[in-house]
Amino acid sequence: MTLLSSAIEPLQFRDALGHFASGITVITSQFNDEPVGFTCQSFYSVSMEPPLVSFSVMARSLSYPKIRKAGRFAVNILANDQAAISNQFARRGDDKWRGVQWQTSPLGNPLIDGSLHWLDCDIHAEHDAGDHRIVIGEVKALNPARGATAPLLYFKGQYHNLAE
């Protein structure tokens, strides 16, 4: 048993949170007619009435300021065969969209082909939280899941699927 401490070491904290399995999403938008996006595992539902979802993004993100200016975003919930997409959008830089096929959502956001599901959202609220920003979106449109595909999961620093 670990004793309480006045300071939690960042690596210990990261390791502890790695024991919580999560799905993987790519948050996308269009800014100045250019697609923008980043991989996000801190996504969750907030409210049914109205339909609200939330994600957290690093305060120093290069992508999020463009999404904020657009005022809207799509949540692309990745399928278990999209680990390469997750890795591609986790990188910093402008070549994230190289080779990625996508369509435009009803709100004009990029929807990554092959995603398990998508939600189209307007930014509803933002909150500063330490080195991250919590973003709440109001869902304006969504699409049913494709077939019987399973989600891409992340656990203890590795991708997993439900069959494992």
Image (cartoon, grey):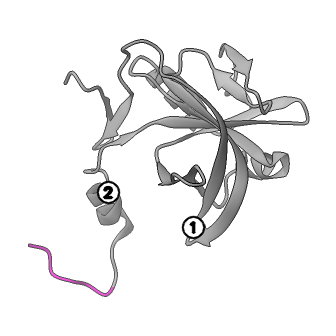
Q: Residue at x 76, y 44 (%)?
A: 72
Residue type of the residue flagged with mark 1: Asp
Image position, residue 158 (x, y; %) = 32, 35
Predominant secondary structure, magenta span: loop
Q: Is residue 163 visible?
A: yes
Q: Observer-nearest residue: 157 or 46? A: 46
Q: Residue at x 39, y 28 (%)?
A: 152
Q: Observer-nearest residue: 19 or 12? A: 19
Quadrant for the C terminus in the image: top left
Q: Does 154 lie within the magenta span?
A: no
Q: Pointer 2: what residue?
A: 17
Q: Callout 1: helix, strand or loop?
A: loop
Q: Residue at x 72, y 27 (%)?
A: 110
Residue closest to the far left: 1
Q: Pointer 1: what residue?
A: 131
Distance between the alpha carbons at the discs numbered 1 and 2: 16 Å
The reply, left or right, for residue 67 in relation to residue 163 is: right
Name which quarter of the figure residue 150 lies in.
top left
Region rendered in magenta? 1-6
